[in-house]
Structures are given as structure tokens and as C-alpha cells.
Image (cartoon, rainbow, N blue to C red):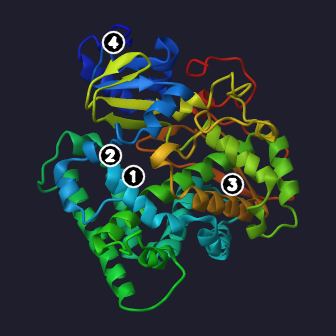
Amino acid sequence: MTGVVPGPPPHRWLGRRGNAHAYAADPVRYTARLHHDFGPVSGLVRGDRRQVFVFGADHNRTVLTDGDVFHTVLEYAIPARIRAARRGIGLLNMNGPDHRAARHTVTPSFRPQAIGQHADLIARLAAAEVDSWTPGQPFDLGASMRRLTLRIACLCFFGVDIADGADEIGRMVQQMLALRYFASSIRYFPFDLPGAPYRRLLRVIRRLDDALAAIIDARRGGGQTSDLLQSLLADRDEHGRGLTDDQLVGQLTTLLVAGHETSSSTLAWTLLLLSQHRPELNEVLSDLDGRSPQECAGSPVLDRVLKETLRLLPPGPNTARIAVAPTTVGGHEIPAWCQVITSKYATHRDPAVFAEPLRFRPERWHTATPSRYEYLPYGVGPHVCIGAAFADLEMKIVLGTILRRHVLLPVPGAVISRQVGLLMSPKGPVPVVAHPAHAVPPARDRVDGDLNEMVDLYGEQRWRLGW
């Protein structure tokens, strides 16, 4: 075995806590520096036995495929009182035999033939969102995509429409997203006191769970629809047992809260990248011409564009696991309860696999054949995203609906940066203007912000997080 795990020194004044704060403030930047400064294995600090980062396809295979040794971190990191407040948990929070049994039960609801029935509804909702835009008038792309994907999720998952924010479920989901489980105000002040974010999160969790339970109870009482809930109600394990109400609540909450934000972020990133790459944009517009929104899901050009966006800007740039038993990674002994973090962001920038890794080059997917451990936007192993096929269908239909009618260009001087919590998304308002797809202005306004750290938008030779 090798010696001490390499890594940076502790913060000069705050010690390890200062490093932890720097990582929490910008996981992408901190992880990139570890990768380039210390190689395939690094601690949060030198010699760390509590938080270790591993990079590369081989380590992805080791950590992400062994679900018995490496557990998903969410159930261990969420405060105990919040865990106790929930009626059920979803696949992202489950481990071991419970996870395998639940995944086996719900898998039929996510097969391509099952999710394909939602194509027409997704197209109709996307068209309604596009109709709400006023050409030539700036609007917030991030807010628009979040509103659309949340509406799609609610209608496709359990038949509730949150148009115009009129439905209470939509408001509760937005409140839950605003009060993140891992926010410092919740992690470091976990007290159920008046005015505390912790109390507000507890309340919204209970209210959302109760609302979903009421929908499930009503659905069990009769009425047949073609949404995901109806499919989950019909699913059975090998012993003929279905999901309980609490199990259904847990699965629906996870899908609703995590699923729609993943898609909304990727949609926004894709449209922004196309706005800065006119030849690629023109190729997409030409390929989509004459296709219906539903037919856009079969566009090979759009498929390559989406793959390249997910390569450069994966919604979950890092994936954390907890080692529940002593193990070895990269020749280093890892103790039980050490958090081991892999990085899609670093993996997708390996120049040995992806030439010019910082350039947006959808054409690379004509010939690129990376392994599942070299390109893993939806994860890999037992916790691979069960909703990947739904997200893929949704995003292609939404992109097709938009690009058949409009090209979205950022307003002059727009600052496009990242914010990273559980997921990576554009930070703050993303002001764009919709132009008719047949009359796109010839000029391209450059964007500022740290999107330029992550993607070489303009062919400039500059340091970008170490690459």
C-alpha cells in the first residue's frame, strides 16, 4: 500500500474546515485543482481519511459499481430529524437490498415503451411555454426551463398541472429546492426554532409528502390515467407485492425534485452553448426543419448536441459515496465511513478520450465510443439514473419545439456562471431574447462569467481550471 493520501495543506487559519468551506462554495473549482495538482487520488487535505477524491475511469468503475461497499451518501448526510419527518425515501437515498428490491419493482415504469406515451404531452406543454415568450423581449431562460420541466414532471408523473404556479404542489417543490438539505444554514443550525430554515424545510417536507399521499390515496380509489403514478401502482415485485403509499411518496418526491432540475439545467446549458456556436446551431436548425416536435427526438444532430452538452456540463459534476467497510482505492487504504468522491466533470475532460476536451464539438459523437466509465452523464452502476430515458426524450422534444420556432440569444453583456449544490445549473437569472429561427441576427454577443472557465467558447488559449 502507498503512504499518506496526497492533498493540499489545511487552511492557514481555519484548518480543514476552511478547505471544506472552499469545496462547498465551488465544488467544480476545488475538485479541478485537486485533480491537476495531486493526480488520481487526493484528500480534501493531505492525509485526509474523511473525504477522498478519486479521478478517472478505473476509479469510477471501482467506486460506482460496488453498491455493497460504497453507499450513496444522501441518507447519511441528511439530518436525522429531516429523515424522520419524511414518509418515504426514493432510489437516490436507498442502498443495499432495499435499493435493489425497489429498483427491480419500479424499473418497468421507466422502460422506453412506457415513457414513450408521454411524448405528445411533453410537446404540448413545451409549445405552451414557447407561446408565452414575446419575441424581442428579454426573459429568464433558467426560470422558464424550470417552470416547464416542473410542469412536465407533475403532469407526466401524477397528473397534476401546476400552470402559472396555481397548484400548491408546485409552490412546495420550489420551496424545497430553495431550502436545500445541504445548505449551511440547515447543516450547521439543525434546530426546529421559529424562523429557522431548518423548521421551514421540515414543514414543506411534511406538507409535500401529505399532498402526494392524498393523490396516491385518491388514485387507489379509482380512476385510470396513463401517468407514471398509475404505472407505479401497477408494478409488482417477484412476490407479487406492490409499493406501499409511503414508498410511492418517497419515489415520487425524489423524481419530482431531482428529475426536473436536472433537465432544466441541461436545457438551459444546451441553448446557451448553441447560441455561441453558430455553425452547430445552423446544422441543428437545418436538421429539425420539417420535423414535428415528437420527431425531433429521433434527430441524430440533436442527439450529438445533447451528448456534448452533457459531456461538458454534466448536471451532477461530482458523485459522492460512503465506504461502509474498510477498502482500498488507488492503492490507498480507505477506512469505513470515509466519503469517496468521483468527478464526471474531470472524467469528461480526459484528452486521451476526448480530443480538445474544452471545445463544444458535437461532431465528435460521429465516431466517439467512450466506455460507460469514461462518459457517464447519468451515472453508472446500481445507482445509474433510472429516469435517463425519460429525461432524454423530454429534453429532445423541448429543444426541438423551441428551435423549430426560435433561436435564443443572451442579452449583450450577459454573465453566465455556475452554481453547484447537488446539481450544477446556471446561476441567477439567464437573460435571453427569442429571435425567429428563420431570421437570426448575424452578430454573436459574447458572454461573460465562469462558463468561460468550463468551456472554450471562443478559441482562446487560457487556463481553464487546470486544463
Q: Which mark is residue 433?
A: 3
Residue toward you, 349 or 330: 330
How many neighbours does mark 1 have within 10 angstroms: few (below 14), some (14-19), or many (20 or more)? many
Q: Which residue is drawn at the image coordinates 50% and 65% (left, top)?
A: 150
Q: Are marks 1 and 2 in contact (CB under 8 Å)?
A: yes
Instruction: Give the vertical position of 271 relative to 293 (above or below).
Output: above
> In the shown orientation, is residue 301 left or right of residue 449?
right
Q: Tag 1's secondary structure?
A: helix
Residue depth check, mark 4 versus mark 1: number of the one nearer the observer: 1
Instruction: Give the vertical position of 352 relative to 407 (above or below).
Output: above
Q: Which residue is drawn at the image coordinates 26% and 47% (left, top)?
A: 78
Residue toward you, 109 or 306: 109
Mark 2 = which residue? 74
Q: Are marks 4 and 1 in contact (CB under 8 Å)?
A: no
Q: Amino acid at mark 4?
A: Arg
Mark 4 = which residue? 46
Res 377 → quadrant: top right
Q: Tag 4's secondary structure?
A: loop
Q: Position of residue 189 (x, y in %)?
A: 17, 43
Q: Tag 2's secondary structure?
A: helix
How many neighbours does mark 3 have within 10 angstroms: few (below 14), some (14-19), or many (20 or more)? many
Residue toward you, 35 or 21: 35
Q: Amino acid at mark 3?
A: Val
Q: Amino acid at mark 2?
A: Leu
Query: Is the C terminus in the top left, top right, bottom left or bottom right quadrant?
Result: top right
Q: CA distance from mark 4 to mark 2?
A: 25 Å
Residue 42 appears in the rendering: yes
How many neighbours does mark 4 have within 10 angstroms: few (below 14), some (14-19), or many (20 or more)? some
Residue toward you, 87 or 401: 87
Mark 1 = which residue? 92
